[in-house]
Image: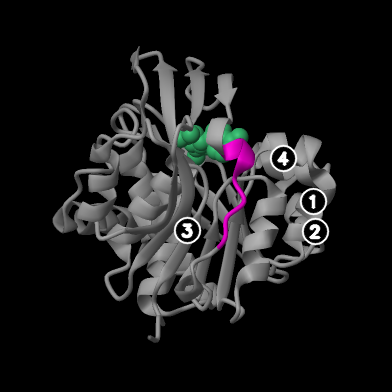
Amino acid sequence: MKRTNDVLVIGSVAFDAIETPFGKTDKIIGGAATYISLAASYLNRAGKTHLVGIVGDDFPQSGLDMFAEKGIDTKGLEIKEGGKTFFWSGKYHNDMNSRDTLVTELNVLAEFDPVLPEEYRSIPYLMLGNLEPRIQKSVIEQMEVRPELIVMDTMDFWIDSFRDDLLETLKLVDVISINDEEARQLSGEYSLVKASRKILAMGPKVVVIKKGEHGALLFNDHQVYFAPALPLEDVFDPTGAGDTFAGGFIGHLANVGGTEFDEMKRAILFGSALASFCVEKFGLERLENLSGEEISGRLREFIDLVQIDMEFV
Ligand code: AMP
């Protein structure tokens, strides 16, 4: 079967416990791949979203039902009998732009060594969520047809302690999507323009740098584009915003079958629009319940935000 618009997502599926100045949650469903696949499924109406990950048998049926309701294929989600699902806990500071990780219990993720189902090996849009770089690379190597677009995310932990593996994976991807602090850490440059140049030299053709409430920058070797974040009155919980952004980005590209820089400009607006929903409530609460009208209404707000009529004299 031809899968011209399908998206393959790999990453953590988790329990999260989150604390923000607005309150705290007990263990709720989270994980990078959860946010990514949900966001991608909203935007990619032309194809299907397939999820590869691992959970323990403590993962609730309601979580699996949520994926099914969104049309997300979980054939690649391994349920490890007797295993415990990955657990992450974080606490946000008052400005909501920074957080401390309180707990990371890898549990079943520690032994995760995914083997892609045969029919996933020719999916054209591959999103490598935040995971050990060695696993990200193994997924790329299992693809029988080189995907049209490979996007990867990573985090400070991997940049610090698994740098060599990360550099190997970076050589194989088209786009890296990271936040400003991670870009600085990876490149050793404070200026994001210089940082992007150094990261481009590591392999990717495009670098997306997310700046939280200050929007996102898109670089290739000769162009730069900027998308703002929607100014929101309250940011309730930023968890998963970066993953939602990435899911929206690849979901849009898959939907239109595009990989060009100009299409990526639109894709970062789609990603920003979905991320703006994600932060409005705790965890997945807002992202789980979105209508098509809400998404198009928010995109309109974004278009209004970036449009201006002016004459140049
Ligand atoms: P974000 O807020 O976009 O950075 O992503 C938050 C999500 O990343 C949470 O739902 C966590 O479950 C997940 N996460 C946190 N640490 C890790 C890690 N070391 N590996 C994989 N996923 C993680």
Disc 3 and disc 2 in contact, CB within 8 angstroms: no
Residue 165 belongs to the span the image colors magenta: no
Comes first in the chain, label 3 or label 1: 3
**Left or right: 277, with 215 as reference point:** left
Q: Residues within 10 Å of mark 4 (few under 14, many from 20)?
A: some
Q: Is residue 306 visible?
A: no
Disc 4 versus disc 2: distance between alpha carbons?
12 Å
Q: Position of residue 22 (x, y in %)?
A: 34, 15
Name the mark on residue 158.
Answer: 4
Lower sequence index among marks 4 and 2: 4
**Residue 123 on image: x %, y %:** 48, 75
Q: Nearer the viewer, residue 50 or 78?
A: 78
- The numbered dot on residue 82 is none
Q: Is mark 4 within 8 Å of ligand 1?
A: yes
Could you tell me how many numbered marks the image carries? 4
CB within 8 Å, label 4 to label 1:
yes
Give the residue displayed 51% in from the left and 26% down from the top: 88
Do the residues under discs 2 and 1 have CB atoms within 8 angstroms?
Answer: yes
- On screen, residue 17 versus residue 201, left or right, reads left
Which numbered dot is residue 9?
A: 3
Q: Which residue sits at x=63%, y=69%? A: 142
Q: Which residue is mark 2?
A: 168
Going by the numbered disc 1, the residue's amino acid type is Asp
The answer for how far apart the CA atoms under marks 3 and 1 are is 20 Å
Q: Is residue 100 positioned above or below 310 on the image?
A: above
Q: Which amino acid does the dot numbered 3 rest on?
A: Val
Question: Amino acid type of disc 4?
Answer: Trp
Task: Identify the element where label 3 is drawn.
Answer: strand
Q: Where is mark 1, residue-wise?
A: 165
